[in-house]
Image (spheres, rainbow, N blue to C red):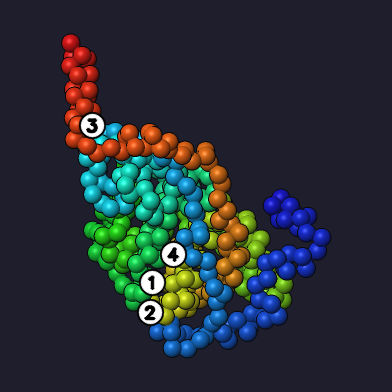
Amino acid sequence: MQTRDRIRREYNSYNDLSRQFCMYDDQSMDSLDDRIEMNPNGCETDCYTLCPCPQPSLLLLRQHNFKLKVYYSNVGNCVQCNKRIRFAVASLRCRDCPLRCHTECYDQLTVNCIPQPLISSKRGHLSDFAPDAAPMVPALIVHCVTEIEARGLEQEGLYRVSSTREKVKRLRHKLLRGKTTPHLGNKDTHTLCCCIKDFLRTLQRPLIPVIHRHDFVLATQQNDPLAAEEQLYLAVVDLHRAHRDTLAFLMLHWQRIAQSPAVKMSINNIAVIFAPTLFDDVDLNLSNVVIWQQVLRVLLLQPPGFWAQFLEVDSLMPACSLDDDEWKRESNHSPSVHWQSVKTYFRSMVNLAG
């Protein structure tokens, strides 16, 4: 209630609010129902109109805070090229996220920096997997969405074609429990989609919790477009920060999916697939599913600017710029440098043993 009053005080009248977050213009909810028709192919008819979405590269561009580090143990593969990080060779390690890569892969890096959550015990809530810095979107969702949009926007059946349960379980374990950020370039896009769906289904509380469900349903039942607009905006703001940011990030992603003719996934199809997942299936019945699908359709029809406002990136520590001399010295891959590092390592081990 305090959040609602604070938002209303920020504007002199609701007309100011409606101009900034215009959703329906002069259309009523009945006209929206007429625009949303079942279109299984998603490309033969224009049953809905979406505003152009921002490109994926414009979202969550948080710079990595790298440091040079030499490893004397097996630390896995580079997240960009998927080649092994060699023994006693300088590589890059991000201070904020568990990303490791070769120094020569620095310029081609496309993986976002998602800070690790501070909570060690995973209780299954969305906030347990989300970073403390905004936008609070779990790394699993960000990395999977980035890879899906990089390779799968021309592939038919995203979020509709299933993958094997073992592949999904293995990928989810790597993204949630792994010590490093895994390379996803060799993963099937349908496995990535199923990983997102499985993660949302297994949360202790759904993405739209039960206590907030009535606010979203009430927004779709308003006959006045301005009242519906106000109710929906306040319902989104009242969500927990992690739920709100994740919902906004997924809405922009699903809008880009719906805009791709090759995928053949209309807004109506996305609403049918994700309505039980986002609203939970505790009281799952036909009447509730129809209402949840209508709410999800309305959310997907919002302009991209409505959702992008919730994804402002909080700045962390300033990214360290590597000194040119230090970079050249540490990234020199000559065998003599390797052997000197190995000899220094073993000398220290002998001194400790003595």
Cα distance, mark 1 to mark 4? 22 Å
What secondary structure is marked by label 4?
Answer: helix
Which one is closest to the eye, mark 2 or mark 3?
3
In this orientation, which residue lies closer to the viewer: 73 or 3? 73
Q: Which residue is mark 2?
A: 262
Kind of residue indicated by mark 4: Thr
What secondary structure is marked by label 3?
Answer: helix
Above/below status of 271 relative to 310: below
Marks 2 and 4, the one that precedes in the sequence: 2
Residue 123 appears in which quarter of the rendering? top left
Cβ atoms at labels 1 and 2 below 8 Å apart = yes
Cα distance, mark 1 to mark 2? 7 Å
Marks 1 and 4, the one that precedes in the sequence: 1
Q: Residue at x 46, y 39 (%)?
A: 321
Q: Which residue is mark 1?
A: 153
Marks 1 and 2, the one that precedes in the sequence: 1
Quadrant occupied by the C terminus: top left
